[in-house]
Amino acid sequence: MSAPESPRTASPATAGAVAELRSVTKWYGPVIGVNDLDLTIGPGITGLLGPNGAGKTTLIKLLAGLLHPSLGKVTVSGRSAASSAAKEHIGYCPDVDAFYEEMSGRRFVRTMARLHGMSKSEAKERAEIALAEVGMTDRADRRLRGYSKGMRQRIKLAQALVHDPAMLIVDEPLNGVDPVGRRELMELFRGFRDRGKAVLVSSHILHEMDALAERVIFMGRGRILASGTLAEIREMLDEHPLHVRLRSSQARELAAQLIRWEDVKGIELRDEEEFSLEVRRPDAFFQRLGDFVVAESIDVSALETTDASAEAVFDYIMSSAARA
Amino acid sequence: MPAELAGYREWSGKTRSPWRASWSIVRTGVLMILRRWVFWLLIGLGLLNFLLNFALIYLKATLTIQNEAVGQFLDAYKVTGTGEAYADFMEGQATITALLLAFAGANLVGSDYRQGGMIYYLSRRIERRHYIVGKLMSVGAVVTMIATLPTIALFIEYGVLSSSLDYFFENGRILVGILGYGLVLAVVQSLLLFAIASWVHRAVPLVMCWLGVFVLLKLLADTARAISDDRRWLLLGIWENMDRVGSWCFGAGNPDKTPSVGLCLTVLVGLCIICLLVIVRRVRAIEVVT
């Protein structure tokens, strides 16, 4: 199976789908933004990955109701994404820092709440909750022009959270944020997920997607190349066998046994106690390996995959897409 | 901070009409202008003109009783309480408003395009029409704040300081004129500014375009009229058109003068329609520019 040929949804659509795209195509004049997308986003954290021009921003804007699809239908909580009713359920945190610099952070968040249709007192109350959630309560009275990049990201998140949306869409939220801030933001997203909400995160920082996203969507050339959990997508990449590193005091003997297995494509001995394998059908392989080492009482001190990260999967998918 | 510590709780409140959300755009726009000291220079200029007229009306009411010559002297400054006097005052204030908008346009509208801030608005529970109306109202609010409201204040002052309240009953047309002139200024200037600022986002080019529309078109109109000896060329002068229609609201101005008020109004309506079409097109164009 070749990854980029058709969109793949490894996981079935979640029952409580927050957003759905059905046969969605978006044209910008003669240029196609996204092409025939079918996608369901449910509760949990979903990572959106792809190179520049892959259609990530178009997909995000379609979901946020900022764009109308040329063909197909985008719904959020069952309503057309561009409708006011759908926007009640979406919290959009764009990547642009386009603030009114003279405003304080607190007033900006309150203004966004008022724009959402809240009364003055409600806007005030919700703004305080959102500011507390992003850890900006004590710094919110400063003017936006004086904020660092990380503080701006937090304020942007606060304005997206202020109306307690069912789905949070964040475009490149970790850009320019220091490591401590990144960890805090990731905790924030997890907390949001824990409340049963959906989070769609677009990011170029792939290694952080490993730790953050439960599902990922790989995009390229306006199409969804693959979607599902990283493990599921990795398993579908037949032409790229999984690389596994294994450490054992009986490495040579174990390697000699494993090379006979049909799921093992190749073995390379690194030293007397370590070798690496190229494996097809990882699930079946790991099941059989487990049974085998127990039955044969083989001592295995380390077992790890070396190319199942988002970055590795991303590279494989993109290289396959380039060849397609 | 964990949600528990932040006191997080779900929001289940009712949202109000998106049209009411448009008021937030108005409030934001007006506050943005009031926060910058540069704009206060022009607001101060408008305030100065208002205070001068306010003081002259007060002087007329108090000193004329002692010395009638003072009253005649003040009448020379058009402290007459007539529609013409208020129309002149509003034209002066409108000039200041136009200058203010020339500089504020880049902040009020241009920045939404230049920095992509429009997506913050449009990702909320409002649609494009609410955004457009909100922005137009914020420009209109600035015009009203500097031109219309001070004129109403002067009208009230003149009436209150008159010997009787009959002034209000006898000059109801003046109040209609103030509101009418204010409406013309607010509608035309807001549409024109939004249309220009949606194309020319930065402050300096916007000032040049904005003033060019009023000053260069006026020069062009005068030149064309001098060459062809046809007064209809004066219709090119947008400012004069606004002034003629505004004065007509007061019942002032010469109705037989060419071009007629009807033609001036037609030009202004046409201009407003073109501006509106440009605005709608530019707001839709957010799909491409951002």
Image (cartoon, coloured by chain):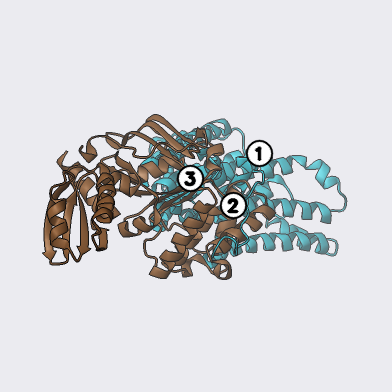
Chain colours: A brown, B cyan
Residue B116's place in the image compared with A128, above or below, is above
Q: Left or right? Give the position of A77 relative to B12.
A: left
User: Mark 1 highlights which residue?
Assistant: B249
Quarter location, residue A141: bottom right
Chain bearing tag 3 is A
Can residue A173 be seen here? The reply is yes
Same chain for the residues under marks 3 and 2 in the image: yes
Give the mark, 3 or 2, whose residue is nearer the N terminus: 3
User: Tag 1: Cα neighbours inside 10 Å, few (<14), some, or many (≥20)?
Assistant: many
Q: Left of B106 or right of it: where is B17?
A: right
Chain ID at mark 2: A
- Residue type at numbered disc 1: Cys
Between residue A103 and residue A292, name the one nearer to us: A292
Residue at 61%, 61% (x, y): give it.
Answer: A128
Q: Residues within 10 Å of mark 3 (few under 14, many from 20)?
A: many
Q: Which residue is mark 3?
A: A43
Q: Position of residue A14 (x, y in %)?
A: 45, 38
* B250 w.r.t. A97: above or below: above
Q: Looking at the rendering, in which quadrant would you find the C terminus of chain A?
A: top left
The span from disc 1 to disc 2 (Cα, nearest Å) is: 40 Å
Which residue corresponds to the image point at 47% horizontal and 56% vertical from the top-left? A189
Circle 3: element type: loop
Query: Given the image, on which type of amino acid does mark 3 rest?
Result: Pro
Which label was assigned to residue A113? 2
| Residues at discs 1 and 2 in contact (Cβ within 8 Å) | no
Q: Quadrant of residue A221?
A: top left
